[in-house]
Amino acid sequence: MNKKKIQDLKYSTVQFERALLAIDRTTAERIISEFKNDPDRMQIISELVTNALENIGNAWEEGKVALSQVYMSGIICEELIDKLFSSFGNKQINNPVIAIAVFEDFHVLGKRIIYSTLRAGGFNIIDLGNGLSAETLVKEVKEKSIKILLLSVLMLPSALRIKQLNKLLTGIDVKVIVGGAPFRFDDRLWIEVGADATGKDPSETLKIVTKLVGEIK
Amino acid sequence: MSSMERVITTLSHKEPDRVPLFLFVTMHGAKELGISIEEYFSNADNVVEGQLRMQKKYNNDCIYAFFYAALEIEAFGGTVNFLEDGPPNAGLPFIRNFDEIPNLQPPKVKDSKPLHKVLTAIQKLKEYVKEEVPIIGVVMSPFSIPIMQLGFDKYYDLMFFHEDLFDRLMKVNEEFCVDWANAQLEAGATAICYYDPVSSPTIIPRNKYLSTGFKTAKRTIARIKGPTATHFASGNSLQIIDDVSQTGTAIVSASTFEDIVLIKKACRDKLTVLGNLNGIEMRRWTSEIANQNVRNLIMNAAPGGGFILSDNHGEIPFQVPEEVLLTISEAVHIHGRYPIEL
Ligand code: B12
């Protein structure tokens, strides 16, 4: 990318982020559509979207924006990416099998946010559903050859029981990433339950998944 | 001083004999009685016995008449799933479709069996503690309960894109909330804890709060015939402290993620601060850490009164060991004597 393009991209990212925070789909779409005819369009749009989502996630972590904005931004980006990329006729990244589930409890918003952010970041993700038990998850991991398993929980007892799941997964080649409120309030809990990583917000999660996918490849 | 005098003094922004401790223990009562959490909450007498024992054991400055949040969903006809080692959760949202909202009616407290258990517990507890120890009743705010009624994603959708239906739902929930709060006060509760985490800047931006949760809180709290505490269930509150102080509430919760010094400053002479120990982390505190955390918190927030020490969520997780709770209580009794040694 040349200097001018990088400048343009920076400017557009700021505008795009503003549109997302204001839940303004039309403006958001207009901004990324400007790159529709660029030969590097896939790279540019992906970067723009992930940068904006990353900034918004970080701002939530710092208490500067609210969860509603994180959620809506993820959904808008996911829709825009789906729409644009399918119109380009391009396939999404061919990543190792990644799956996400709500472990034991039924609080789906965290999973929905992480799912849409990762999809907006270009990853293919299998949604395994909600309220899954350890046994079901082990079966799914084996059957689908899942290499990265993302688990969302809201309740502390569910978080603690991930330890048992991880024991059942020993010897199987899968990385487990955990997240949800209990892991935000206790930053050592992910180690205690034997997970490979945790993310406090969608932007951190996007970075972790990108890194892991690079390592696995 | 009795617990009641201690609390009233701090609420008037003066220093009592020591920092009041609100140890929000709910499920630990089941441990005390050696029964399951489900059985414990199935009967008012269990909760009465559990609360009285825990009040003595931990030298608690309040009785906490909270069963669990999803109890209100039972009153609406929804379901609840119990766990062996944690609080019960609401079952699948009972409003499946937005078009059910126009016909939704507020449940009547007087006809609701689940709510009657709480009212009976409060009446019996009041006979024991009289005016010595405050009894804290609990309501979910009309603005926060929709997450359990609809699901979180659908509620965002309703709040941001379906104003008329949102207003209608607030009407129903406000009627219920006022009725429920006043019934608890009538039964003997001293004050009502108004749980409103959706209003927290963690969950919605302040400008949205001002046009929604703030208005709901103002209308609802005005009709509750007793003092209220506004609780954000460990959500942040600093950005909206001034607004919250205009809703007519007396107490505001502080999250463990925010600087208690800044919160205390923002609340000065307007609101009493309630908080902000990290309940989730508490599970693995050693007695040194527990003691240190209590001490720091007291030094930062207690001088001048206007402060009640508690966890930041309004409920101690079931997994927190009794020893940690005993240490916290001891530490409050040692370091919390006024004047605070800095
Ligand atoms: C709003 C709220 C409520 C509302 C609605 C709750 C709901 N969703 O059903 C009300 C008032 C009704 C409520 C009630 C209760 N609550 Co509440 N509540 C909250 C609050 C403030 C936000 C919860 C929420 O839904 N957040 C939205 C989700 C999406 O946020 P999140 O999980 O943090 O997810 C983010 C990140 O963690 C990450 N992430 C999420 N998943 C994943 C997955 C991966 C792989 C990764 C990497 C990252 C990641 O990305 C997300 C977006 O940034 C939290 C405290 C807090 N500050 O977070 C307590 C909290 C969730 N509540 C809690 C509890 C206990 C309850 C009750 C059981 C209390 C009771 N005894 O009745 C009830 C249960 C209600 C029910 N469903 O039946 C506890 C749960 C932990 C525990 N102690 O066990 C919390 C954490 C409070 C605390 N500090 O202890 N609550």
Image (cartoon, rainbow, N blue to C red):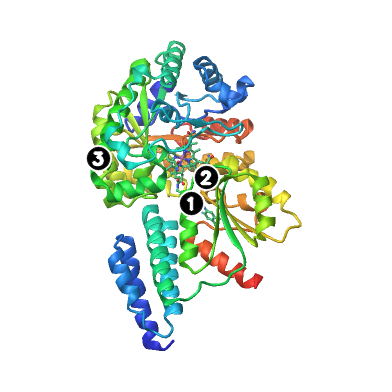
What residue is at 49 percent from the left and 58 percent from the top? A115
Amino acid type for the residue under numbered disc 1: Gly
For residue B61, side relative to residue A13 (left or right)? right
Counting the numbered discs, the total is 3
Q: Is mark 2 within 8 Å of ligand 1?
A: yes
- Does the image show residue B176? yes
Q: Are marks 3 and 1 in contact (CB under 8 Å)?
A: no
Q: CA–CA distance between discs 2 and 3? A: 28 Å
Q: Are marks 1 and 2 in contact (CB under 8 Å)?
A: yes
Q: Is mark 1 within 8 Å of ligand 1?
A: yes
> B340 or B89, which lies in front?
B89
State the residue position of label 3: B167
Q: Residue B182 carries which label?
A: none
Return the x and y of residue B17 as percentages of the image width and height: 43, 27
**Subunit ID for the residue under disc 1:** A
Q: Does the residue labelled 3 lie within 8 Å of ligand 1?
A: no
Q: Residue A154 carries which label?
A: 2
Return the x and y of residue B164 as percentages of the image width and height: 23, 43
Q: Quadrant of the N terminus of chain A?
A: bottom left
Amino acid type for the residue under numbered disc 2: Leu
Above or below residue B75? Residue B238 is below
Residue farthest to the bottom? A2
Amino acid type for the residue under numbered disc 3: Asp
State the residue position of label 1: A110
